[in-house]
Structures are given as structure tokens and as C-alpha cells.
Amino acid sequence: HGFDATFDGVSFIDQNHAIVKGSTDTSDIILATRDGGTTWQSVLEVNADELGAVEFIDAFNGAALGAHGTLFITSDGGESWKEFEIEATGWGNDIEFIPGDASQVWFTDYENLFYSSDYGKNWESMDVVEGDIKGRDIVFVDDEHGWLICEDALYYTNNNGGIITDVSENQYEELSKEIYLSQNYPNPFNPSTKIEFSISDIADVNLIVLNS
């Protein structure tokens, strides 16, 4: 590749386009290829130890996290970058685009979760829990369903990513402290019924229906 650097990650967007994040003694860099890795071009360079996660949604739209809330966004494959500031209190741990929509972006550091609906120009802090969320990773599988992975919790949204109000802790953390078995409904049933139950721990359950 011709660059005197140490590389710590590569992401192929398609068979021709890929990005590589690396570092030298004096700077952190992002390299890009548009010919399947035959040639590489430096598309972003910042001071050493000031570049975090890098995410591209397609061959043109991507983002890179800088130090202390600095965010770099490109819409031309890295040819040019716009720099934005997020009111983050720590280093950015992850950034995620809503699949198919580069205008919607999520960002997490250790303490906060942020959302932008205008390509990163403006950001809104999302209240998930009281105190630090300890955010580590964000994953969206489509334009509705996403997960926020934290050190001691997992949060889920099914509301298109634009509103965080439906995000709740992982169901395993919401287990009832009581054991109960509800009356089936409808009763009598033909040909099917629903039976609600709750247990106080994660376990395999066998439910036996007897015809008395």
C-alpha cells in the first residue's frame, strides 16, 4: 500500500470500495480504495490517538469519530469531510447510520446517546437511563429495529430509530420476581388458546396441558 502505518481494521463496502483505519507515530489515518484494494488513497488524517470508530453506509456516505465529540462526515467517499461538534463528555465509542438513510445517525460515548436526523448537523441527547449509559456499540438491522449495547445492559428500539421512547432494557433484565400461571384464554378453546406465565429466572420451561 505504500503507507508506513499500523492498521487495525478494514471494512469492505462492496467488491470495489473499502476503508482502512490506521495510525503512524504522529497521526491517525483513514485509507480508501475504489478498485478492490489495488490502490489506496489517504482520505482523512488527524493527530495521533484522536480517531475512533469509522462507519460507512455505502461507497459515498461515511463518518469518523474524533476526540471528545468531534465528528467527521463525508458524502463523497472521503474526498471531502465536514467537521461537527457533539456535546459529548468523553470519547466516542460507536457511530451507526440507519440502513438506507445516511441522514439519520446515532452516536454513543461512555456516558450519552445522541441522534441526528440531518446528516450530523444537529444532535439531540437521548435520555435512556439515569446516569451513564456505558455505551459500547450500536447496531441497526433496518430502518426500525436497533440495539444499543452497553457494559451492563442491552437496549432495543422498534420505532424507526428516530424516537428513543420505546427503547427498554433487555427482556432478561425485566424478569418478574414472581412465579405465576394465568388462566388460558379463550376458555374453552378450539382449536387454540393462549396461556401467560412468568418465572423469576432464566430457564427452560415445559408446559403440559392435560385433558381432564
Image: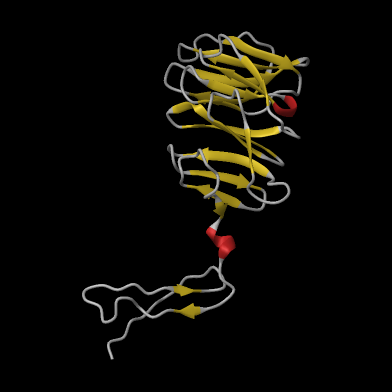
Residue 45: x percent and y percent? 68, 13
Residue 103: x percent and y percent? 50, 26
Question: Which residue is at the front of the view, 137 or 84?
Answer: 84
State the scheme by which the image is colored: secondary structure
Residue 86: x percent and y percent? 68, 28
Q: Where on the picture, by quarter, is residue 99?
A: top left
Q: Identify which residue is drawn at 45% across, 11% down.
A: 35
**For residue 149, above or below residue 82:** below
Residue that sits furthest to the bottom in the current view: 212
Q: Where on the picture, by quarter, is residue 173?
A: bottom right
Residue 31: x percent and y percent? 59, 15
Q: Quarter of the image for the C terminus: give it.
A: bottom left
Residue that sits furthest to the left in the current view: 190
**For residue 1, above or below residue 124:** above
Q: Identify which residue is drawn at 61% across, 15% down.
A: 82
Q: Quarter of the image for the N terminus: give it.
A: top right
Question: Which residue is at the front of the view, 116 or 180?
Answer: 116
| Mark count | 0
